[in-house]
Amino acid sequence: MARVTKFREKWRCQIERQGNPELSRTFLKRADAIAWGKWAEAELARGRPVEEILCGVPEQPLPVSLASEAPPPPSNYTVGDLIRRYLLEVSPHKKSGKYDASTMRLLLADFGRLPITALTSGALSAYKTRRLRSVSASSVTHELGMLHRAYVLAREEWGIEFPGPIPRTRKPPQPKGRTRRVSDDELNKILAATESTELPIIARFAVATAMRRGELMSMQWEHIDLLKRTVLLPETKNGHSRTVPLTRAAVALLESVGPQPSGPVFQLRPDSVSQMWGYAARRAGVHDIRFHDTRHEATSRFFEMGLSQIEVSRITGHLTLSMLNRYVHLPSTHLLEKLDAADDRKRAIAGSDKAWGKTGGGKVRSKKAGLWRKLRANGDKG
């Protein structure tokens, strides 16, 4: 049965299917979410492919059937055919490929019937402007980037020739990265406001390890070594595995869960964690805070502990220092403390040098002078 819930400033419709992955779509209006849920359930009952349901809307079905077997001749390719082939051949091999159909939905609705040679940069620019009124710049960049990759594959690997350059438009300006941190007081308020027994452990473990939400929810007991205090993440967002060292606090949190020989550590779904966090934050009166801010907080705390950039990146999994720096938000008070400590050390060294000159240094010089006079006297005698 379809379930509609509030998600930030939007409405999310989720359809649970026994033995199959859950279907989920997000809408600006609650009425649209309800309408899509009813339509999607009916289409599922008719046996319509899931990809079409994720991309379609009740009032505007897909212009291109994703279920067709053979691709058309290259000369007859439409933008919809290009997207369909991308979803069928490329998306299944991507870690986040299950979301591609939803990402391509509006592109299909707008450009699906166009021949691939008819799509222009002006049309993409108009699409970008319209989408920016309702979604973030990063979402628009992701959508247009996926369409561009489909065009590149068509020309370089699929043997589909078309004249002229690939149509494209400038990326929308990206907003400045968040600088939000999570104070201990805010964390305590939020976790006191939740009814979940797992969320407090998950959130505190996130602050102790800087692990991403998806990494936390995919943790397996067989990958945890409590004696060595490490957890192995075989697959992460950037495609690399990494081993995360566990602080004593992190180990204590895992022990409170009750270690098992194997299986998932936590039972919540990633999106449920964000929803429960947001709901608890509103109840606690803590504003403008996301679960991902715990990763910013943890990363900043590692630097405050005195760890180097390389050491922190080994924990957080950032591949470049520029990406790591986006997560570091050190307060001016912490920087002032380090500056004052450095200044105190400098003064202490300068003071010891002066004291050495007045005491120890003078004694050494007087000893050398006495030894020189003694040598001269012996030489005169000889």
Image (cartoon, helix red, strand yellow):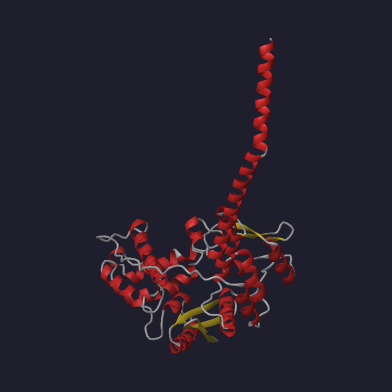
Q: Is residue 144 visible?
A: yes
Rendered location of residue 80, percent (x, y): 35, 71
For image coordinates 30% across by 62% down, the residue present is 166
In the displayed image of the protein, which residue is found farthest to the bottom?
31
Please state, as top left, top right, bottom left or bottom right, where the C terminus lies in the image.
Answer: top right
Q: Nearer the viewer, residue 33 or 330?
A: 330
In the displayed image of the protein, which residue is found farthest to the top?
382
Q: Nearer the viewer, residue 88 or 27?
A: 27
State the count of labels: 0
For image coordinates 62% across by 68% down, the residue present is 207
| Horizontal arrangement in the rendering, residue 119 relative to residue 348 (left or right) | left
Q: Is residue 373 above or below residue 366?
A: above
Q: Is residue 111 visible?
A: no
Rendered location of residue 203, percent (x, y): 62, 72
Q: Nearer the viewer, residue 79 or 215?
A: 215
Q: Nearer the viewer, residue 360 or 61?
A: 360
In which quarter of the view is residue 315 placed? bottom right
Rendered location of residue 370, percent (x, y): 68, 25
Q: Is residue 163 above or below residue 217?
A: above
Please state, as top left, top right, bottom left or bottom right, where the N terminus lies in the image.
Answer: bottom right
| Horizontal arrangement in the rendering, residue 40 relative to residue 282 (left or right) | left
Q: Is residue 38 above or below residue 106?
A: below
Rendered location of residue 340, percent (x, y): 57, 57
